[in-house]
């Protein structure tokens, strides 16, 4: 690590500390005592205000409660930031959709001319093809807030339940062109995976009942997942099939190598069998369903339906 980069990392490391010791820097950055002492002197010249105390409770006491020193990015880090902005621009359905262009313009404006030209060349010649959002999410900001603040909400999402339902959201995730959430229905005491674009009404509720903490929600979902996805299955994959699975897979799927063979292992629920069949069909000849027989039969029926079209 270059010295300038190490000093930057040390500033970030110290940003939430009031006291630090020489040994901490040595261990955190794998440097010698002499190098740590030189770094502390350089940090002081950069503007880090501190005083030292000797004794058992001694160390370096930072006097400014919040570090206001500029954190500098090297060329590789700057390229990574702009590449990331390019990668997410197609995921347009977020509360921050209109901000990405502004962020990019502001960052670009603060770079030296040489780096500005380099970033423009990167955008011209490096194309990142990401999957765009397929459907508009009307209540993204409210759902995101409910998830982060662990709020109880009253919502209408008629994928599984007709009418209004009281929900707690564990998380939001983006997959295959759509946004989803893991939602716990308080009245039914049951988990659902809901598409965000299917919400037709969202309202925050003042909780008059005991709701679960984030940790409790997470534990509840893990328990549900084990019970709900109870039917194991196995498929044989080609190398291309493995690549396709890695590009678009689900948490309950696992790829396993045994000798020269590649297997896809997972679990499904009977109610969602048709979703798994459609997913496997999309892999074409890169997958062979091995077990259980129920999945093999459903897969073959779907294939026959497709063949009949011709």
Image: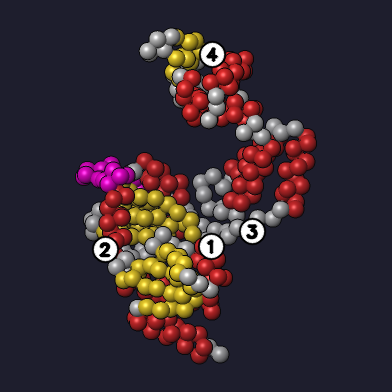
Residue 224 image offset from top left, x and y in percent:
28, 59
Which disc, if any, is residue 129? 3
Q: In percent of the image, x 42 and y 52: which residue is there? A: 172
Which of label 3 and label 2 is nearer to you?
Answer: 2
Magenta residues span 203-216
Say which residue label 2 marks.
227
Which disc, if any, is residue 49? 4
Q: Secondary structure at mark 4?
A: loop
| Residue 293 sits above or below residue 23 on the image | below
Q: CA distance from mark 3 to mark 2?
A: 38 Å
Residue 85 image offset from top left, x and y in percent:
62, 46
Q: Secondary structure at mark 3?
A: loop
Which mark sits nearer the N-terminus, 4 or 2? 4
Look at the numbered discs 3 and 2 and tell me whether their residues touch, using CB distance below 8 Å.
Answer: no
Q: In percent of the image, x 33 and y 71: which residue is there? A: 232
Give the image quarter of residue 182.
bottom left
């Amino acid at each position: 690590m270059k010295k300038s980069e190490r000093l930057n990392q040390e500033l970030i490391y110290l940003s939430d500390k009031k006291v630090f010791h020489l040994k901490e820097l040595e261990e955190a950055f794998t440097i010698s005592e002499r190098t740590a002492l030189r770094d502390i002197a350089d940090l002081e010249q950069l503007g880090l205000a501190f005083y030292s105390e000797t004794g058992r409770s001694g160390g370096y006491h930072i006097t400014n409660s919040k570090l206001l020193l500029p954190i500098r990015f090297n060329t590789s880090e700057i390229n990574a930031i702009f590449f990331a902005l390019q990668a997410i621009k197609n995921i347009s359905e977020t509360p921050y959709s209109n901000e990405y262009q502004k962020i990019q313009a502001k960052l670009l404006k603060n770079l030296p001319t040489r780096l500005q030209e380099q970033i423009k060349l990167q955008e011209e010649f490096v194309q990142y093809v990401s999957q765009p959002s397929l459907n508009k999410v009307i209540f993204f900001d409210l759902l995101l807030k409910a998830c982060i603040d662990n709020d109880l909400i009253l919502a209408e999402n008629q994928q599984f339940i007709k009418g209004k339902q009281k929900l707690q959201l564990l998380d939001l995730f983006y997959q295959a062109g759509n946004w989803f959430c893991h939602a716990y229905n308080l009245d039914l005491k049951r988990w659902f995976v809901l598409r965000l674009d299917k919400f037709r009404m969202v309202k925050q509720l003042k909780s008059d009942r005991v709701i679960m903490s984030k940790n409790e929600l997470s534990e509840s979902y893990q328990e549900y997942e084990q019970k709900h996805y109870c039917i194991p299955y196995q498929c044989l994959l080609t190398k291309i099939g493995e690549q396709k699975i890695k590009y678009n897979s689900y948490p309950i799927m696992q790829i396993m190598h045994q000798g020269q063979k590649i297997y896809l292992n997972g679990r499904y629920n009977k109610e969602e069998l048709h979703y798994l069949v459609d997913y496997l069909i999309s892999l074409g000849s890169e997958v062979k369903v091995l077990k259980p027989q129920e999945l093999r039969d459903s897969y073959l029926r779907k294939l026959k339906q497709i063949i009949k079209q011709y």
